Image (spheres, rainbow, N blue to C red):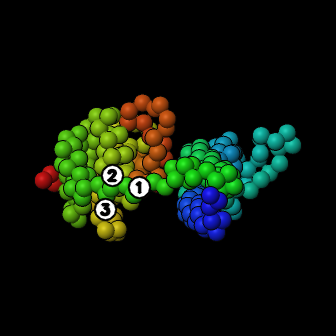
């Protein structure tokens, strides 16, 4: 017996429609990934532009120091001889007139460090995002090829079940079980966590701290990671910032110094270099405050 060709056509159409629906869903997922990572690349490029050229900042600092006794100042402009150029021309560098040349040079070197670190960290994130875009574009090509070949198994494999939501209390249990941090409360009522050991520092920074929490560490000295918990996007009072910075300086090798510089930033700008030692991080962006190393006015619950 010969089957009804109309039934065969209907089945074929149903199969084609099913494949197209599956493919459309899979494509949308990849297109969302592409849009997400393109937006990320645009934001990262903007961050790089804000950091500026690290070589420019270093050169400005070096030129000021090499002309420390001969530079001419007119308001906020410093005239120096560019000894790095064979023609030794006179060049102009901006610098606040109320600051000394040494202070201005130090400021340029800080900008250099930020820009250099930003170039390395942000550049790596841009490469990762571009790789994700390329992978998503390749997946769309595979989806199109699967539709043309009628490969239903491949298209089905792209339909992933939704991940089960993690129990609400899981992170709270992890935090309460973590014993690797000293706990303080600032004068303004903000919780401050101070890591004890290098491994504790990593756990505190990358498992406990949230993206918008404040992160601090003594500049140029080994020491504890310090995290200020900032719930509900509250504005952090300057007094709490100073108290947390004092703790970061106190729980570091700068403890005996009369004053110590402390770097601070949001946790989202703290990154862990691959295969780096416990406690070692890099910062994509940060500011610095000078404080006296001490426990200060904070309390321990």
Q: Which residue sits furthest front?
A: 1
Q: Residue at x 31, y 68 (%)?
A: 232
Closer to the observer: label 1 or label 2? 1
Instruction: Say which label, 1 or 2, has the lower sequence index.
Output: 1
Residue 127, how many percent across, how many down? 63, 47
Gap in angstroms between the C-alphas marked 1 and 2:
29 Å
Question: Counting other residues with Cα less than 10 Å from the Cα at mark 2, is it few (<14), some (14-19), or many (20 or more)?
Answer: many
Residue at left 62%, top 65%? 4
Query: Percent position (x, y) of residue 128?
Result: 59, 47
Name which of mark 2 and mark 3 comes first in the sequence: 2
- Residue that mark 1 sits on: 161
Q: How many labels does the image show?
A: 3
From the viewer's side, name the closer residue of 196 and 219: 196
- Near mark 1 (Cα within 10 A), the count class, few <14, some 14-19 or many ≥20, is few
Marks 1/3: CA distance? Answer: 34 Å
**Is residue 219 among the parts visible in the rendering?**
yes
- State the residue position of label 2: 209
Q: In the image, is residue 235 above or below residue 267?
A: below
Q: How crowded is mark 3: few (under 14 residues within 10 Å), some or many (20 or more)?
A: some
Q: Nearer the viewer, residue 186 or 141?
A: 141
Mark number, residue 230: 3
Q: As rendered, which of 181 and 176 lies closer to the eye?
A: 176
263 left or right of 126 in image:
left
Q: Residue at x 29, y 38 (%)?
A: 200
Rounded to the nearest whole Å, what is the CA distance between mark 2 and mark 3? 10 Å
The image quarter in which residue 10 lies: bottom right
């Amino acid at each position: 017996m010969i089957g009804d060709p109309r039934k065969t056509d209907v089945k074929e159409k149903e199969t084609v429609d099913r494949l197209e629906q599956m493919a459309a869903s899979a494509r949308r997922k990849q297109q969302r990934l592409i849009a997400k990572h393109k937006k990320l690349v645009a934001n990262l490029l903007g961050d790089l532009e804000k950091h500026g050229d690290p070589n420019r900042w270093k050169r400005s600092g070096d030129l000021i120091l090499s002309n420390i006794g001969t530079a001419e100042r007119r308001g906020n402009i410093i005239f120096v001889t560019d000894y790095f150029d064979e023609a030794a021309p006179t060049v102009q560098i901006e610098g606040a007139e109320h600051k000394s040349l040494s202070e201005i040079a130090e400021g340029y070197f800080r900008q250099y460090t930020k820009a250099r670190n930003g170039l390395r960290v942000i550049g790596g994130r841009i490469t990762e995002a571009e790789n994700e875009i390329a992978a998503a574009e390749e997946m769309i090509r595979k989806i199109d090829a699967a539709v043309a070949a009628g490969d239903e198994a491949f298209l089905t494999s792209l339909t992933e079940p939704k991940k089960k939501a993690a129990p609400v209390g899981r992170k709270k249990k992890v935090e309460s079980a973590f014993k690797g941090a000293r706990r303080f409360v600032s004068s303004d009522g903000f919780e401050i966590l101070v890591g004890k050991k290098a491994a504790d520092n990593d756990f505190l920074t990358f498992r406990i701290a949230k993206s918008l929490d404040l992160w601090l560490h003594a500049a140029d000295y080994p020491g504890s990671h310090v995290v200020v918990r900032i719930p509900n996007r509250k504005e952090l009072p300057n007094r709490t910032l100073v108290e947390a910075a004092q703790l970061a300086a106190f729980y570091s090798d700068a403890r005996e110094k009369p004053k110590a510089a402390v770097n601070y930033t949001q946790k989202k700008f703290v990154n862990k270099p691959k295969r780096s030692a416990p406690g070692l991080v890099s910062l994509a962006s940060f500011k610095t405050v000078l404080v006296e190393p001490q426990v200060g006015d904070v309390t321990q619950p």
